[in-house]
Amino acid sequence: MCFEDSKSGAKEKRTAGEAGWHVSCYNLMAEVPGTKNVAIANLFKGNCAEYTPIEMYLLSVLEELDEHHPIIERFSKRGIIADFDERAALETMGRAACAMPHGLGLTICPTMGCNFDCPYCFENHSANKMTSEVQDDVVALAKRMLDTSGAKDLSITWFGGEPLLAPDVIESLSDRLMALIEERGGKYHADIITNGYLLTQEIADMLGRCNVETAQVTIDGMGAAHDATRHLANGGPTFERIIANLRDISLPFRVNIRHNVHEGNKSEMDELEAFVEELAKQSGNDLMYYPAPVFGSDVADERGGQVDLLCGSDASEVSIRQEAKRFRTGRGHFCGAHTLWAVGIDERGNLQKCWEAIDKPAIAFGTAHDWDPANPFATASNPDNLTMYLNTACPVPDEECRECVWLPMCVGGCPHKRLFEGRRCVEFRDNPQAYVLALHARIGEEKRSG
C-alpha cells in the first residue's frame, strides 16, 4: 500500500522497512559447495531453498527496497522475511497448544513387563498387566476427554514395557475405543512401540484390525552388535528372530526401524540402512530406517550396564541425519507433555505427561478413574505434576532459549529432561551449516525424484 497525503492527495511511497518487513530472526545459512549460491533454512516456516548472489544482495538491503518490490513476495512465502513478531507468534502457539483440542492422544501401556533387558532403557519393569477394571477406566477417561474437548479424533500409541506381552488388552481396548470414535463420526489412529520379537502373522493381523498404522521396532546394528544391547532378559539373542518376523510376515502397517546409535554400533549405520532397504524389497513390507543417538539414563546407570554413549560431534552427525528427514514448520510446543489432551496411562491407570515418566508413579498427576479434564486440577491427585510440564511450553522459562535461533525447532527442548536432568539443546546447535546443507541435499533429492 501507499500512504496518501491528506492535503495534496499525493501518494507517498514506503520502503519495505517502513512497511514492517524485516529479515527473519530464524534463518540459518550455508554456502552451497561448488557454487556462489547460499542455502537458507527458515525454522519458523519450515522451508529451505537456494538463493543466488543477486537475491542475497536484495535480502541484505531488504528494508531499503520499495515495499512492492517483486522479490518481497517470494521471500515472504519462503519465510526468510516477515512483517510480524515471530517469537510472539511462537509464544501464542505455545499457549494455544495447552488447551486447543485438535485431537486426543493417549499412550497406553497394557503392561510394563518386558521380555528384553536393554542396558540403556529408562524404565523399571514390572510384570503387572492391565486389569479389566483399569480398562473400563481408560475408556471412561477417553469419553470424558472427548466430551470436554469437543474433539472427534483419537490417536492411540501402544507402549510399555513390551505391549505385545498383552495382546488381549490391545485387542479389547481397541474394539471399545474404535466404537467410541465411530459413534462420534471421528477418525481413529493407532501406532505401537514394540521390540518386534513377538510379532507373528496372527498378531500382525490383529493389529491391522485394530487400526494400527505404524510400528516402531528398534534394531541396534547387524547381528552381534544388535544382540549386545537388545537381548532377552535371560541374555539370549534376538536379531535373527526380529529380522525373520519383518521378512516373513505380511505386515499391514508401516514399520519405522529405529537404530539407537552409540559408540559400539555407529560404524554400522550405513550398512544397517542398506540392509533395511533390501529387507523391504525382499519382504514387500513398508520398512523405513532412522538413527537416533543414545544418551544416559538414571535406570541404566543404576544397573551398571550402560553402553558407551554417543556424544560430541558424532551425536551431532546422527542428529543431523535424523532431523533433516523430518524438517517441519515451527511450533509452540515440543510434544504432548505441553497439552492437556495428550496423556500417558500405565497398566495401573496412573496418568503421566511423558513416556519417560510412565513407569514412575511418584510423578503421576492423577488416575484414569478420577481425572476429569473439565476440572483438571481439582481432580488431579497431584496437580503440580501436571502444571510443571505444561509450564515448560512457550513462552519458554529461559531467556537464553527465547533468544535462540533454534527456538522454533526445539521449543526449549524435552520438557522431562528440562525438569529432571537440565536443558538439553539441539546436538548440532553449534554446527548450523551442516544442518542446512543436509536439508538442502534432502530437498534436492526430493525434487529430482519428483
Image (spheres, rainbow, N blue to C red):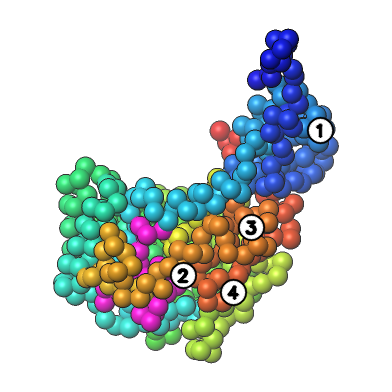
What is the span of residues highlighted in magenta in the rendered image?
339-363
**Which tag, 2 or 3, sits closer to the chain's start?**
2
Q: With respect to residue 244, does 30 lie above or below?
A: above
**Which tag, 4 or 2, sits closer to the chain's start?**
2
Location of residue 407 by image quarter: bottom right
Name the residue type under label 1: Val
Task: Count the numbered circles shown.
Answer: 4
* Alpha carbons under labels 4 and 3: distance apart: 16 Å
Q: Which mark is residue 61?
A: 1
CA neighbours of label 2 inside 10 A, class few (<14), some (14 to 19), many (20+): some
Mark 1 element type: loop
Name the residue type under label 3: Arg
| Residue 344 included in the magenta stretch of the image | yes
Residue 417: percent from left, percent from top: 54, 72
14 left or right of 356 in image: right
Q: Which residue is mark 3?
A: 402
**Which tag, 4 or 3, sits closer to the chain's start?**
3
| Residue 39 included in the magenta stretch of the image | no
